[in-house]
Image: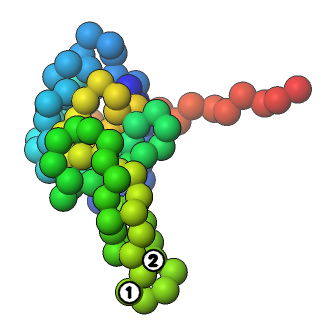
Amino acid sequence: MRIVISESSGKSYQAEIAKDKEAMIIGKKIGEALDGNLIGAAGYVLELTGGSDSSGVPMRSDVAGSAKKFSLMSDGVGFHAEDKGARKRKYVRGNAYSSEIAQVNAKVKQAGASPLDQLFPKQEKKEKK
């Protein structure tokens, strides 16, 4: 499971969550707090803001549960209308985190002692040969 942490400055940082610590996220809902010690960011408090599963289906805060559901939407996460008033049925995940979630999105609610760019240094991309 991957976590993407966003700061108020607009920067975001990615980290991998260990398999044995994924159980601490499962069952939580969008909007709940998460301790930064879980991912190696001591002193940080993170707020869960969403995520997506391995096939890219986004989580939506107004859909209950953790299952994938076919929901009628007019706007918001998972659907952006091209025409005014357009509605469409789309697959979305509920607001509860499960083992099927591949990416967890969070934002910094309370900062810790050291900055995030030191805790999660940017990784160089590998060149293709």
Q: Position of residue 98 (x, y in %)?
A: 25, 29
Residue 71, image quadrant: bottom left
At 40% from the left and 37% from the top, the residue drawn is: 53
Location of residue 24 (image quadrant): top left
Label 2 amino acid?
Ala
Disc 2 crowd rating (10 Å Cα; few below 14, some 14-19, many 20+) is few
Q: Position of residue 13 (x, y in %)?
A: 41, 41
Residue in the image at 26% along x and 10% along y:
20
Task: Identify the residue shown where x is 32% and y is 42%.
Answer: 68
Q: Mark 1: which amino acid?
A: Gly
| Residue assigned mark 1 | 85
SS for dot 1: loop
Decide: is 113 above or below 64.
above
Q: Which mark is residue 81?
A: 2
Q: Quadrant of the N terminus?
A: top left
| Separation of residues labelled 1 and 2 (CA atoms) | 7 Å
Relative to the observer, which residue lies in front, 22 or 54?
54
Residues at discs 1 and 2 in contact (Cβ within 8 Å): yes
